[in-house]
Amino acid sequence: MSDLTNILLIPSLMLLGILLGRARVGLKAKHLEFLLINIMAPILMFAEIFKADLTGLALGNIVLLSLLYVGLCFGLSYLSSRNLSSKELGTVVINSTFFNNIFLPFPLIYSFYGDLSAALVFSLPTMILHNTVGVFLASYWGQGRFEKKVLIRAITYPPLLGFLLGFLARPLIPGFAATTAFAWLHQFGLLTVYLSLIFVGMVIPLSKESLLVFGNRITGIITVNRLLLSPLVAALLTLIFSPSEAVRNSLLIMSLMPPAVTNLLIISRFDLDVKSTSQSLFVPTLISVGAVFALRGLAVI
């Protein structure tokens, strides 16, 4: 798709999601989330990694880059909130470290480049850390204890299983990628790209209060961490490691993403600051999309 089409389509789908979220219809955000997490995203991960040309990608280097990025974001967010209460610190660190790594960046990256290979590999470590370390820390800061069932839920996370199955199936059934069945499966998985944008719109808390990002100290810290410090970390890592263009672009786009929408579930489950988390989603999401398109227009990505 052309960049003009993307500029029109991506916000339009998010707006559709916002309207659906406020309308009294049968479709709820939880229904779409179940469909995306348990069916659509696993199929997308399976199909994309199965057909991906990985010859030009240094998988180990991408994983290392992903881990370094998340680790530096964690360190900076912890330093920025170390004088806060335990619940406030947990809210800042979770939302500053664990970002939207599927629902928003995948549509952007795919629409720009038509290839998710680098993004898939980069998102895998962050996905695992989010569902293990992120939940462990949230339970500790929110309730003063660790939830023991987290590891099992993380290992059986459907998008992760889809990625692993696709990767393991590559040498076993290499001819499958040329079949009509795979073509249909791949196209079905790509619907995730568009449904994800609708889902983001549906779950973004839209209210007058959600516009006051810097009226809340905690939300302000999260926003600065995600939209200022995070891109600086990514830029520094690209200068040090000089990754391929595909990896570089994926990292820069990922670094501009707002907190993960699923953080709301984690924050709520462990009695952290739901209000600040909600406020850190709406305006930062709009700024994120605008920043990505601006960089695209300037030919930076």
Image (cartoon, rainbow, N blue to C red):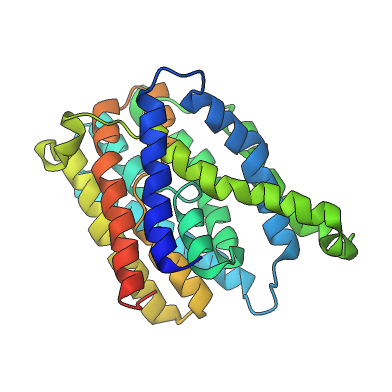
**Furthest residue toward left:** 215
Picture coordinates of residue 250, whole percent (x, y): 47, 66
Measuring from the top left, give residue 202's x and y in whole percent: 41, 32
Q: Of 202 and 219, which appears nearest the observer?
A: 202
Tell me, yes or no, if residue 134 can be seen here. no
Count numbered badges in the picture. Answer: 0
Residue at coordinates 52% horizontally, 80% vertically from top-left?
Answer: 244
Q: Is residue 2 above or below residue 222?
A: below
Q: Quadrant of residue 275?
A: top left
167 relative position to 281: left or right: right
How far across and down, in percent of the image, does residue 47 sit?
72, 55
Q: Tell me where residue 85 sits by quadrant.
A: top left
In the image, is 167 to the left or to the right of 115?
Answer: right
Query: Compared to 120, does 297 lie above or below?
Result: below
- Specify whether 44 is left or right of 218: right
Q: In the image, is residue 202 above or below residue 269?
A: below
**175 in relation to 225, above or below:** below
Residue 18: image x %, image y %? 36, 34
The answer to whether residue 249 is visible is yes
Residues 37 and 24: in front is: 24
Q: Is residue 233 left or right of residue 149?
A: left
Question: Where the C terminus falls, by quadrant?
Answer: bottom left
Residue positioned 19% across, 46% down in the render: 221
Between residue 58 and residue 244, name the one nearer to us.
Answer: 244
Residue at left offset 44%, top offset 63%: 68
Residue found 35% across the figure and 24% down from its top: 22
